[in-house]
Image (tube, coloured by chain):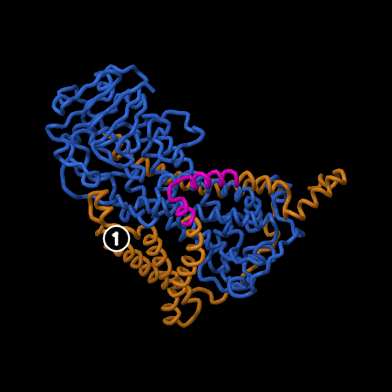
Amino acid sequence: MAEAKSDAPVAKTLRQRFTYEYGAQPLHLIALVASLLLSGYGLLRIDALDNSVRIFIWILAGALLHDLIALPLYTVLLKIARLPAAVALSTRAAANHATNYIRVPLGFALLTALVYFPLIFRMAPDEYMATTGRSVDTYLGRWLLLSGVAFLISGIAYAISLRKEPAQAEPDRPVVAADDVESPPGLLWRIAAKVTIAGAALAILWVAAALVVGLLTTGLRP
Amino acid sequence: MSRLEDLGDRVAEVDDARRPPLPDPPNLGPFKREFWRSPLRGEWLTAFLGSMMLPFFVIAALTGFLSHAAYNPGLGANDLTGGFDVDLYFFDWPTRPVWLYSLTQSLHLIAGFAVIPILLAKLWSVIPRLFERPPVRSIAHSLERLSVLLLVGSSIFLLVTGVMNVDYWLGPFGFAFLPAHYYAAMVFLGALALHLVLKLPIVARAFRREGAFKPLGEGIERMRRSDPKVDGLASPNQSEPTISRRGLIGVVTGGSFVLAVMTSGANLLGSIREIAFLSPRGQTGGPAGPGDFQVNKTAALAGVTREMGGDTWRLKLRGGERELDLTRDSLMAMTQYTEHLPIACVEGWTTWQTWTGVRLADLAGLVGVPSGSVVLVESLQAGGAFRQATLASNQIEDEKSLLALQVNGADLTLDHGYPARIIVPALPGVHNTKWVSRMTFSEA
């Protein structure tokens, strides 16, 4: 903000007083108000719905349940997953290496359980039957099977990995310096764009592939 | 100086602001910066996970609003969101391509499921921020934290309600899914827009400092440490890593991919439903025959019996002054057309079947209504939001739009809408009313 310094003295003090009292430049407040207007509209419309208090509680509870209960819980679970490897293996590097072959399939089982637990643990078997005309009982077996396969694949991968060179015990770790990567002006836009484009490309590629296969196998039938 | 850096300067907090007179939490446990020890945490990891999520959220938001438009909320009682003050939906939902709604709704579900593991990892990467000291540095900081609370709360709310809705377990919530999901999306988008403005400069800074993709080339042996002096998310007390940043992103991407594959199995890939292994609509099999495909709400749930559609059943056609009561036999005596069309549900599953019946346009012709009319279709079903739906004129006039009497060469089964059901190309599944009892044409 080199230009701002050459402004008239009154404007300068006003702006400085504002930033001191508010904590950021005026653009911050403008962006914040614009954002709160849209969010606030959504909140007002929710307020007009039936049982709106429950909706507000769930919006708050979702954040709190995740941050204060779910996150510590799975962190501890994934730490416990290290115990068998730490007990069985003598060096820390070997234990670390083995741990991931337990943690990854465990994480996979937890993720699928998180997303599909009402089916797996039969939270609403009657609703499922009434809506789809089928029984929900199959899902527990399916989940156990899929998780079992994940652990099996992981076990095989671990056995294969043991045939390679063991990991170096405690490698030197360089710290990222503030100016690690030189950048000409304008590069920031390009790198921010690059990652977004890479993510979008992956998503679009998968969906395009699914669409083509789906239409070829079903939609284009005469 | 790039424009992004310039933006960063304009929206960044200033150091010498007035601090609200609030006591600090004790410098203990999670409030202590040294408590958080993972060497993976840092601005690069958060920036990369955030960038990964963005396309999914954009797809989910766009297809979500498109889904609302597909219900033609301007017609009859179609709008279930409690009425939109400003009608943003200025176009009639098209009927071509016939798989349009299947595509948009599949994208919505795939994007929503795929983002779950990425969001979990992203929230893990910034959890130390929840316990930052001081909790409030300035007015700007407090408002920003409020907005982050809205962002986290609404994003979790959207994903949880969306997932529970397709898992058929909304009992514990005690509110209507549709309007809550719809307006929570607006809360989310408002908070997300601010988040992007405030964080893009930090994303750019992290990518410039560490290289946008460079850490993806570093296995656990060569992984660099983030410097807590310049990186607000890096731990000053880092432990030895047990997985690399590359490894974490690989695991997250893998989880995301598995959920996307399973979701698309019941959607776009309706023919390979077996890969939707854990999805609620991944079950195949059941009673073999022409009626063996996915049912949305059984006749038992809708309270419709075989007798209601028996010999006494009449299709009550109404249009202007004219009223016609048609038996099923007289409908069967009209010219029959056969179309291969999908039912695409808002819950994100699709099933393609071959339907036979009379054209809606022919029924409109019977009561002689002018072109441009709309039709209110009512079901034998006694209650429920979807016992009726209003169809637009382009949907009535489309040559593929049928009042179906048969599917796959046999009479409809009771669960699939016997004695007659609507099937219209690109129409959301629930608007293809089953057990039709009355059709009332009127000028729009």
Identify the hue of chain B.
blue
Q: Main secondary structure of the magenta part?
A: helix
Q: Which residues are magenta?
A: A36-57
Helix, strand or loop at disc 1?
loop
Q: How many labels, in total?
A: 1
Is the residue B66 above or below the residue B40 in the image? above
Can residue B156 be seen in the rendering of this structure? Answer: yes
Judge by depth and name the residue closer to the eye, A178 or B84: B84
Q: Position of residue B342 (x, y in %)?
A: 30, 37
- Residue at the spot x=51%, y=71% of the render? B242
Q: Residue at x 75, y 58 (%)?
A: B17
Look at the image and say whether residue B281 sits in the magenta stretch.
no
Above or below, A40 against B144 in this view is above
Return the residue nearer the eye: A208 or A21.
Answer: A21
Q: Amino acid type of disc 1?
A: Arg
Image hue for chain A? orange
Q: Which residue, given by chain and number where applicable, does mark 1 sit on?
A: A122
Position in image of residue A49 (x %, y %): 45, 46
Tell me the quarter of the image containing the C terminus of chain B: top left
Rendered view: A72 above or below A31: below
Please identify the residue farthest to the left as the structure is shown: B311
Q: Is residue A44 magenta?
A: yes
**Residue B379, position as x, y percentages in the image:** 26, 35
Q: Is residue B294 visible?
A: no
Disc 1: host chain: A
- Neighbor class of circle 1 (other Cα within 10 Å; few <14, some 14-19, many 20+) is some
Is B47 on the left-hand or right-hand side of B1? left
Across and down, in percent, residue A89 comes to: 44, 81
Instruction: Classify residue A175 as left or right of residue B88.
Output: right
Q: Nearer the viewer, residue B15 or B43?
A: B15
